[in-house]
Structure formats: C-alpha cells, structure tokens
Amino acid sequence: MSIYYMKRTCLYFAIKPIGHRFFVALSFFIVGLCVASPLNAQISTDSEQVLSEQEAVRRALERPALNDLWAAQIKSDEAAALRAQARSNPIFEYSREQAFEEPETLAEDYLILEQALPISGNRGLRAEAARTRARATQLETHADARKIATRVRHLFYRVLALQQRVEMRSAWIEQMREVEQKLVQRAQAGESAPYDVERLRREIADVRADAASERAELAGARAQLAGLVGIDSAQNTLRVEGELLPAKLPDDEALRRAVAGRPELAAASERGAAAQLSIDAASRWWIPELILRGGYKSVDVGTQRFHGFVAGVALDIPLFDRAAGERMEAEAALVSAKSRRALLKQQIQADASEASSKVRMLSAAADTYRTAGVERAQKNATLAQQSYDAGEVGILELIDAYHGVVGSRLRLQEMAAEARHHQIELEQNFELLNDKISQHEGE
C-alpha cells in the first residue's frame, strides 16, 4: 500500500460520516480475513497430526530401541544355550623322560592327545533348558508388547475423551453466548432484569474454567501419547480419531480360547519345562565323565630308537554329589513356575470376566441413556427457552435446563469412556492391533 493511498484513506475517515467509516472498516476487516485465513489454515494443517488407534499402537511397537531391547534379551538366553552345549577342547601334551646311566642314556618321548567325552547327556539337557528359557523370554516380550499396546490404547482414548469434552463445553459456551446476546437485548428493552444477564455470564465463566482445566489435561495426555508413539509434541498438535463407545464384543468361547493362549501363561509353562530339564541334568551327577588318551611314544636306548603308542581311558569318580545345589535350585524354579502360572491364570480369568461383564452392561446402559437422558435433556432445554420467553420461568430454570444438556452429554461420554477402558483391558487377551476383535465386529 502506497503512502499516498494511506493518506487518502486517513483523510477519508476524517471527513466522512460515521456510517461510511463503518463500511470501510468492515471492508478492511473482510479483506484481512481473506488474506490471513489461508495462511492460518496452512499452518494448522501442517502442524496437526491425526492418529488412529491402530496407527498409535503400531508406531509404539515399532520403536527401534524397544525392538533392540527385546532382541537383546532373547539373544542373551540363546547365548546361554551355546555355552551349555559347547564341547571341551582336546588337550595336546608333549613330555620327555630321560635317565643318565653309564655307558648308555635312556630317553622316552611322548606325544599325547586327550579328549573328554561326556556320556551322561547332561550337557544336551542343559542346552535344551537354556533354549527353552529363550522361548520363554520371547513369549514374555510378546506379553510386554501387549502391555505397551494397552497403555497406548488407554492414553489414546483418554485423549479422545478429553477432546470430546472440550468440544462439548466449547459448543455449549457458544450456544450460551447466543442466549446471552438475546438476554442483553431483552434487558436493554426492559423485558428482562440485568441480573439474568450477569447470572448467565457467571455460569459461562464457570464452564470456561472447567474447559480450561480439561484443556490442560488434554495437553498432558497428548504429550504422553506423543512420547510413546515417537511424535514431537512441540512441533505437532496431536489429534486422535475414533469411536469412544465400544462395538460388539467377542463371544465367550473366543474369550476363553484367548485367555488360555495368553503369552504370560505360555511363558510360565516354558519356564517350568526349562526347570524340569535342569533337574534331569542335575540328577545325572552319578554318571562319570569319560576321558580318552592316545598318542605316540619313542624310546631312545643308547644309539637305538624304539617306536610305539600310548592309549588310555580315565573316569572321574562321582563320589560326591556336586549337583545338589543346582538340582535344588531347579526344583524351586519348577514349583515357582507352576504356582505362578496357576495364580496368573486365575487372575487373568477373573479380570477378563469382570471386564466382559462391565463393558456389556455399560454399553447397554449408554445406549439406553442416549434416548432417556440426552434427548430428553435437549427437549427440556427447548421447553425451558420457550417458557422463559413467555415469562413462565426464571433465568435459573433456563440455565439449569441448558446445563442439563451438556451434563447429560458429558455423562454419556463418561459411560462410553468407562466401557472403553474395560474393553481395552479385555483386548489384552487377543492378538495385537485388534485382529480377532475386528474380524468379529465385521461379521
């Protein structure tokens, strides 16, 4: 804009009536919105990242550091198996024996190779026990993955619930601002008391305070979720999309099969199997270890040399039970694994039964309340507005009716959020990324 044009504009504002100034100012305002809106929209689009539930779980489980940690844990147990099955190296020995006697010298040279041959079989049993523990560790990483997925899902739906609550309160505030404008006009016309306006404004202020508190909670939940899925919350505004109220649940038979196949239970079984193998290995302490010896022998007598061989067999005598401590430790590990599996199975079954009952009841209650509570509250608000306009009720009754609308919606949302919470706990029994549940819901 040139300086000449700015001067002409200022002069125009100075000499034109107020009505003309208003239209010119309005024109500048509209032009400013047209110029700024695309830029603001572009900034919002670039900085907002929308996330679905499955995408959040996938990103959390595909973090390189997490997978490297699990791989290292499994490799550590696999290394123990390699150590257990490693064979002892052969021993090479050279020795010379010599005696000095006149008139001849007597000398003997030995080249001997010695190799231990374990015949008890405990080396193979210990190696198999280590491999079994490696399988148990792998199953435990699967259980850890489900726990991480459960935490991500809880955070995901926490963010979704807070998003919805903030949007509900914001929509209510906008609706109340329209009511406020009408009340101001009525008060200026002498049809309503100024108290009505101030009372409504105080109610709006209270709801704004609640919305501000929930926005703070939303920011914290978004930051936690962004950290788990590897998104920079300082550069991106995370927004999630999904349905808060759960869909249909898997049937009881599918749930029982899923509970029986939990990786924690399978891992405990593998730990018990590894302990039994260790017991079997330690129980073979009485079998001796065989050592074979063989080699070359030469004897020098004066100027003559004689050649021969050396052969021998040796056995260590298992006089003392040196594996008693190992066997006792393995027996304790076996009892621990069996007891842990039994207790864990009981707990998982109880938790699954509780979650299944709660999510079914809460989902049914939410469906009923949507009609009995939310829709009726909206009708009450419409009737209250009509009655207030007719002078039949006061401002408190009107505010209470509108407050009942947002209250019923928030209550329905809380029921849906609680149902989703128990649904997530139930989903721990199934494959990751909702494979089985999604298949059931699609039927």
Image (cartoon, helix red, strand yellow):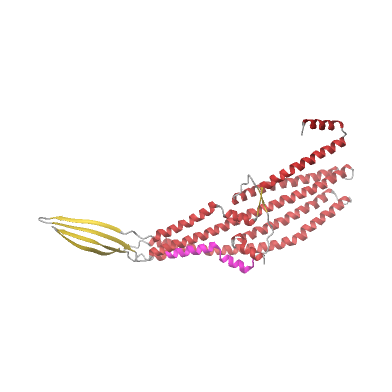
Residue 410 locus on image (x, y percent)? 73, 54
Query: Which residue of the protein is positioned furthest toward the bottom in this rendering?
Result: 253
Numbered circles on residues, count: 0
185 or 390, nearer to the observer: 185
Q: Toward which corner of the image does residue 28 lie, by quadrant?
A: top right
Point out the stretch of residues depicted in magenta. 250-277
Secondary structure predominantly adopted by residues drawn in magenta: helix
Compared across the picture, whether 424 is left or right of 16 comes to left
Compared across the picture, whether 38 is left or right of 181 comes to left
Taking the spot 78% from the left edge, 48% from the top edge, the residue there is 174
Residue 289 is inside the magenta segment = no
Taking the spot 79% from the left edge, 49% from the top edge, the residue there is 175
Q: Is residue 31 above or below residue 442?
A: above
Query: Which residue of the protein is positioned furthest toward the left in this rendering?
Result: 103
Query: Is the N terminus in the top left, top right, bottom left or bottom right quadrant?
Result: top right
Residue 257 is inside the magenta segment = yes
Query: Is the C terminus in the top left, top right, bottom left or bottom right quadrant?
Result: bottom right
Residue 430 locus on image (x, y percent)? 60, 63
Residue 263 locus on image (x, y percent)? 54, 62
12 or 52, nearer to the observer: 12
31 or 198, nearer to the observer: 31
Residue 59 locus on image (x, y percent)? 59, 54
